[in-house]
Image (tube, rainbow, N blue to C red):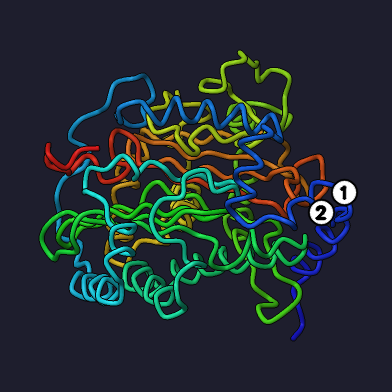
Amino acid sequence: MERSKEFKAASAAFRQHIPDLTIPRFTTAKEHDVYQYANHFKTNHAPPWLFELTQAWEKLYNEPYKGLTTDGTVQEGLFTVQDEDLPISNIVSAANSLLSELNDSQKSKLKYPINAREWRAWSNPEILLRPFGLRLEEVPESIAQSILAVMEATLSKQGYEKALAAMRINHFLGEVVGLPQIMNKYSYNFLLFGEPSETEAWGWLLYGHHLDLSVFIKGKQIFISPTFTGAEPNIIDDGPWTGTEILHTEGNLGLKFMQSLTEEQQRKAQIYKLLHDPAMLQTGDLTKDRWNKDDQRHVCGAFRDNRIVPYEGINTASLSEEQQNLLLSLAEQFVLYLPDTSRKLRLEQIKKHLKDTYWCWIGGYGNDDAFYYRIQSPVFVAEFDHHSGVFLSNTEPAKFHTHTIVRTPNAGDYGSAIRKPEEKL
């Protein structure tokens, strides 16, 4: 099958940055299973920049949950209980089917109270910092497939395909760098909160390298937030899943939107010209710093549940109807995990707040430039970032390594805004 020019370019680009697999970083890691790998990291504090960040994360994890805000004050009344025509009976059936396969020990590992702090334990690195729940690679294939069945029943068709793509690309990266025991399609942890119910609150969490999905369900309503979806590289160009690609639409539509702005609007939107601009002042406090080597330009990543993120860039209320529609098309890509009716209602909510929505951009906006952007409103935050190499050797951000984050600010993450007091995190 003829590949697109974009696919061929992405393949050629990342293939130039395959690392030297004979260096100690890789030869040592090859000797470790996932737990030895994590223990080596914690014992040797290597790499030091990531160890220091995990210490900051621990501090943030211990904070009581409040929610992402622009000024420290949660806006009330933005989220209400509603019927989203969620196929709840199918989701509950899939979850109960999973539970029926588990022994008591497996159930005790999988299940958590509805208000458990472990909702917030997700993180993106391949290092298993918090080994909660069931790990897919450690259970029989039938149970792993049942976990995937819960995901498939919960997510939209497009969303489930997107999640599978992220997991398969993680597997592909493990093969490329010779660490399949650390990164593979099943190197993810799955947790179940509460009891599967068609009326009461419950949910699940899947987390691991380049895929983190937090799902809160109550009756026929669902919150899928926070989410983290990433890929390094963002295509598979060899093996049984050749042709798989991910996050290109988000990048292409984001660039198209930025290029649709007038020069004056672009100047307002571009908050930093360089992807690692010296103006991103470092305080030394990684709980507050604007930039770090893991999050890079992201400000809403793992453990940033209570972060104050002021609006930046350009207010979208002044844009043309065509530009606003393009922005909504872009927003839809970030909420693709939501089932169809829930996604439609979510987009209506996002559209309702366009007058209070801001768009900001970091980096250039030529066709070949790597970049970061953020869409932010009282009810929605989406971040897109091109990263430098973590396993690949590129020292500067490149279009073949992509991270995306979705947050629901003002206590919308984890469905907190519609939880009963006894269900609160």
| Res 325 seen here | no
Q: Residue at x 84, y 57 (%)?
A: 18
What is the C-alpha distance between the residues marked 2 and 1? Answer: 6 Å
Question: Is mark 2 in CB contact (under 8 Å) with mark 1?
Answer: yes
Residue 365 vs 85, above or below: the answer is above
Which amino acid lies under the numbered mark 2 shown in the image of this protein? Thr
Toward the bottom, the furthest residue is: 1
Q: Which mark is residue 27?
A: 2
The answer to whether 340 is drawn above or below residue 264 in the figure is below
Query: Which is more toward the observer, 25 or 89?
Result: 25
Left or right of 39 on screen, residue 83 = left
**Along the viewing direction, whichever of 44 and 120 lies nearer the viewer:** 44
Identify the residue position indicated by label 1 in the image. Answer: 23
Residue 276 placement (x, y as % from top left)? 72, 29
Task: Determine whether the residue tagged by mark 2 lies in a helix, strand or loop.
Answer: helix
Q: Position of residue 404 (x, y in %)?
A: 55, 48
* Image location (x, y in percent) of residue 160: 44, 69
